[in-house]
Amino acid sequence: MKIFWQLVYNLLFLPVIYIIARISSLFNRKIKEGFIGRRKTIAKLQAFFKDRSPQDLVYWFHSASHGEYEQVRPVLSGLKEIEPECKCIVSFFSPSGYQHVNDSDIDLKIYLPVDFYWNSFRVLKIAKPHKLIFAEYDVWPNLIWSAQKLNVKTTVFSARIPSNSTKLIPIIRSFYRHVYGSINTIYTVSEKDHTGVRKLLRNNSTALVRVLGNPRYDRVKELADKNSVDRSKSIMGRDLRLIAGSVWPEDEIIILETLLELMRTREDFYLYWVPHEPDEKYFSKAKKAFETVEIPVKLMSECKNGEMEESRVIIIDSVGKLAELYWQGRIAYVGGGFSTGIHNVMEPAIARLPTIFGPKFHNSYAAEELIEAGGGFSISNDKEFSETLEKLLNDKDYFLKSSSSATGVIHKNIGSATRVVRGIIRD
């Protein structure tokens, strides 16, 4: 059956995906950049390993994009502390990862080559990694099968296969059983995911499956510790401000009217508005939406010292500020839950913020944990958003319990990075 799926993948699935991607690259700049970068991968590997020593210890990490690399970073850092002489390759599928990740622990950064069998086999023959390590979900069949043939050990960490995963649909499950069944070690986020992996594999694999958590919790804690904000201040000592982070147009439809009404009726209510994709056209449109109801609004770039705290609405027109801004609010709304899936809910949670988000949250284990603990709230429409926000604003005990629950979820999960590093070295 494995040979059947290898033939289907290489003769049908992969060619179709490749053709679609090539056509899309004519119209999509990011896809085009990815293809250009992938053409340079083999040459970069050959140059890097030109004078390698037989004693060189090489680890190859793969991450889909910038967001997934936030899980890799603490693991890579921990590995370098224990084995400082090792060489670490990090490959990315997306240009957002390749172009924006700069980490001194990375010895070589590359694009993952197109997953044709000859490509995968060749790059592994050049790199000869001690271990090939995938973060979360972006596993590539030919790369795994080639590693198995070359006796390169493979690991997936932060693996998630919940009960509603498409990987468990009968026909799809058969394919993924032979992909995941070729991996040596699989470290899941939770016991539920452990059950999902076991259900996927059945008894067809000798893979070692263990629950080790998600290293991204460690990364969020690390970033919070580095922030220059005053984290000793009680959350009730902060201004009554909602931080709307990574807002998509689909989120705006749900939450904007409620926020406008709240700002009209409560002069002590403030807002930081952080769009998912900031650009001049959007900033102009967003400013107009607030100005039409006579609410003062400024762009972050227009603010001088102290003006951010004093202004009713600040639209954030620069990237990389969100994690720090959460420490200046009391409640968070995290976008993406009405489009492709919610963004990072760990950052507001560690800042002690009760966090609201849309219904598409099952891509995030942290969101599921926040809901279960009472620190997170999934809403499906504007009415539910209004009711949730009203209760958090008007019931102090309810708010404080939610705040404590949110940050508690983060702290109870810290330590995963250390466990994953130990597993990579020992298993």
Image (cartoon, helix red, strand yellow):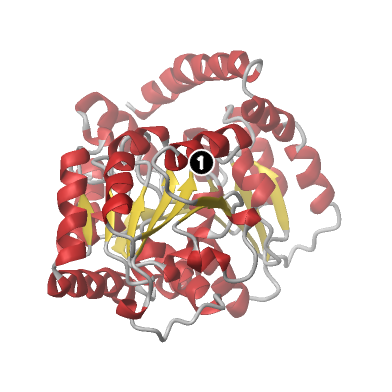
> Which residue is rendered at x = 34% and y = 58% of the image?
332
User: Residue shown at 64%/55% (left/top)?
Assistant: 302
The image shows residue 309, relative to residue 237, as above or below, that is above
Rendered location of residue 274, percent (x, y): 48, 49
Tell me which amino acid carries mark 1: Lys
Secondary structure under badge 1?
helix
| Number of dots carrying numbers | 1
Q: Residues within 10 Å of mark 1 (few under 14, many from 20)?
A: some
Q: Quadrant of residue 361?
A: top left
Out of 163 and 12, give the one closest to the viewer.
163
Q: Which residue has dot 1 on it?
A: 287
The N terminus, quarter of image: top left
**Nearest to the observer: residue 115 or residue 283:** 283
For residue 108, side relative to residue 271 (left or right): right
The answer to whether any part of residue 143 appears in the image is yes
Q: Position of residue 161 (x, y in %)?
A: 27, 46
Front position in the image: 309 or 18 = 309
Residue lying at 44% horizontally and 25% vertically, measured from the top left: 6
Q: Residue at x 60, y 79 (%)?
A: 81
Relative side of 266 to 283, left or right? left
Residue 112 image-quadrant placement = top right
Q: Is residue 153 visible?
A: no
Q: Residue furthest front?
A: 294
Residue 312 place in picture, x, y as percent: 44, 58
Horizontal side of residue 68 vs 163, given as left or right: right
